[in-house]
Amino acid sequence: MVKGQFSWKDYDAGNTKHEWDLQKIHAAHKVLTEFKYDKNKIEKGFANKTLYINLTTNEIKEKPVTDDMKKKFTGGRGFGLKLLWDSIQPDTRWNSEENDLVITTGPLCGSTQYPGSGKSLCLTVSPSTNIVCDSNVGGYFGPYLKFCGYDALEIQGKAKEDVIIVIDGEASVIRIETAPLEEINTHLVSEQLTYMYSSKDDERSRQRVSVVSAGHGAENSYWGCLNFSFWDIRRKVARLKQAGRGGLGTVLRDKKIKGIVARVDKFTGVENAPENPEAAAKVGTKIQKEIRDLDRYQCNMRQVGTAHLVEIMDAYDLLPCENYRFGSFPKAPKIYSMKFFENFTRVIPDGCWHGCTMACAKTVDSFEVMTGPYKGHRVTVDGPEYETVGCGANMSLWDPKWIIEFNFYCDTYGIDTISSGTAIAYYMEMFEYGILNKERCGGLELAFGNFNAVMQFLHRMADGDTDEFIKVAAKGIRRVKDWLKSKNWGDHQLIEDAGMESKGLEYSEYVTKESLAMQGGYGLTLKGPQHDEAWLIFMDMVNNQIPTFKDKAEALHYFPMWRTWFGLNGLCKLPWNDVEPANNAETNDPSKVPEHLNNYVEYQNAVTGWNINKEELILQSERAYNWQRALNVWMGRGQRRDDWIPYRSMGPVTELEYVSRQERYDKQLAEIMNKPLEEIEKMDVGKKVKLLYDHRRNQYQILSDAVYMRRGWTQNGVPTPVKMKQLGFADEQKMLDFLAKKIQEDEENGLNEWGGVYSESEEKPSKERRYWESW
Amino acid sequence: MLIINSKEVIWKKDETISLLLKRMNFVFPMIVVKINGRLIKKDKYSTQLINDNDEISVIHMISGG
Ligand code: SF4
């Protein structure tokens, strides 16, 4: 045992113990259907089957994973897109009977040789955006699903009453059972189901069970997340990781699922059956050592997790404070990572899947809950991660304990901290302007910094409160914008510009006003404004490495391909570039961490037995990325108008924001208008806000032109049949015909035109308007 | 005058890389520093002086998320 550590048997988290009559709860189950199966042996990272469950008809069946499917979609998120395409219709909505909830693995998911190899990718038609949303998550469920014999789980239809789905890899049987007596909130139901379905009453058996669930918040909002459990044998609790974005948990509860349980009979560490285990171990050992030796001098993730970013974002004016109005705040040091470190249980290494040396999943044990139904209970809280702390800054909550409480309830209620935190911050700003007030907010004093009002809002929402504000607010910023405008309670432009959502999804926690590339990284995305496609702020705003539109477009093509690739394979992104080899600086292109890129090529080849190179790896992503965009277009979205972003993410909405960065903005205006700085300084602030407004909105359109062209899409952002054929979809006639028809319609409606207004000195991305015909 | 990441910054006498990074508030730990295209190793940051008219790149490695 490492010095300073202690045996897991000796540790007591100090949490409130639960006394449940599990036999009685279990006895109340009624088996609705049972499906016995022959478990496929996993070969080279694939189980080669997916599992289909229909909750309306109680049908359970298997679908084959074909070579064609692997060739076109690789695995993971790609498989999810393929399954959705086969099952849904263009007008399928989140609560339609035929909407699929898909949980996928990926060929590298379930390996233990390389850090970060336990991620699942979950997909569904989102209540927030009405298009497909994908969200990645750690925890044990994905790997266990594969060890049970399936590369993906697809759930269609809706149950009539609350059910659980049990995937029992030990007995090779799958059951749908009614579950009338179980709890719904996650920290309780995941513990109940883990105890109920572990084959023996010991910690190791409980570790072989993983549960997917969402709580009462998920069923009463559009922010539902999926909680994936991983039993912690030291703390003796079900730890949690979230597939947070896009309302997947809302769909889970709409299908009346209380929990999905996966149980495996054994876990040996080589269950993923790599083609060449020695090569996988070799490349894995190298990065494990790198993380162990260097992380403490770099991001310090092993100590404080992703929260290390709080102080950095504050220093670079990027931490979203009071609804993204400001990028830093005098009180921010109160929530720097060390303040959370003081609350974290130390000494115990914390990975969300075996073999992850990065071990960034931190917890606060024995946290005494301060509000709501569990007031006075002691619980283990996972996190908070950077994004959740960022939400604290956005709501002006400057006490780590408040943020931990917010984190706990979001998790157990099954709601996304990012969407709810960003949305509440917007409601607070509207409250400050009097557009909302106590009466309009159902009696809540929703002012910045009011922790009690935030918690009351969450509790009332989870409780299914029918107050008009609570009901609309729980659907997120987009619906609240429409509601405020329909009531005529404030200036419509302000209501639109200040709310940080795009495509109906709330932004994650970075201020993007001074980085045009990052605005594209949020807006020119598939699912909506999440930073998991391209995080380009440093590259653009600080390093000045991508000054031209063409450079930015190249980055907005390349980086999303990497991030997509992790989702195709079941990998965590963090070990890619949150740690770097000691000699990384000496390489040609340190931003891309070339050694790690080589690792990934070697790793995928070692597991799958394929023989790909770096170019082929990017191509794998490009196929899935373009397919998802085409799917969005097929569902009536995924076009230029859908990629629009609120002005708060482009520049200063209010005069107060302008004044907070006056020097920077004045200089920029002097350049744009070709006038002396002194003259600009004397101008009226309101006028300057307007001038910048027009300029920056046009810059975003010009960026969109450049990006669409780089991606091989039309000016309206539609992938072309030519491009799709090049990517290997020549036999997908239905999709090709649809795209050709859509582009023709756009032509007739005048939508295949550049979106930006170009001055005489500015060049359009191409002289050819129909450049995409000859791609 | 110095050029740092293509922007003009006032030069200060006797300033080392460490002091310059502090002045610029470049606190991110994963950076690469080059002076006139020459890579500077981290162990030289506290001793390497900066000359007037130097062109410096302080590349912050992409991270986040
Ligand atoms: S780096 Fe963190 S989030 Fe990623 S797999 Fe490891 S423990 Fe999980």
Image (cartoon, rainbow, N blue to C red):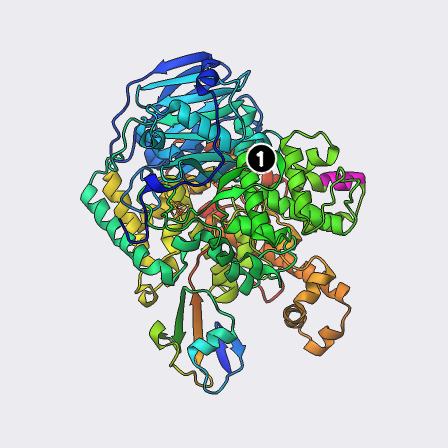
Horizontal side, residue A135 vs residue A296: left or right: right
Mark 1 falls on what kind of element?
helix
Horizontal side, residue A7 vs residue A373: left or right: left
Horizontal side, residue A583 vs residue A641: left or right: left
In the rendered image, residue A485 lying in the magenta stretch gets the answer yes
In the rendered image, residue A244 lying in the magenta stretch gets the answer no
Q: Is residue A124 visible?
A: no
Front residue of A284/A502: it is A284
Disc 1: host chain? A
Residue corresponding to mark 1: A374
x, y percent for residue A429: 71, 50
x, y percent for residue B62: 44, 59
Residue at (71% x, 29% y) in the render: A466
Residue reaching furthest bottom? B13
x, y percent for residue A610: 25, 41
Instruction: Give above or below for A131 relative to A666.
Output: above
Mark 1: few/some/many CA within 10 Å (<14, 14-19, 20+): few
Residue range corresponding to the magenta coloring: A482-487
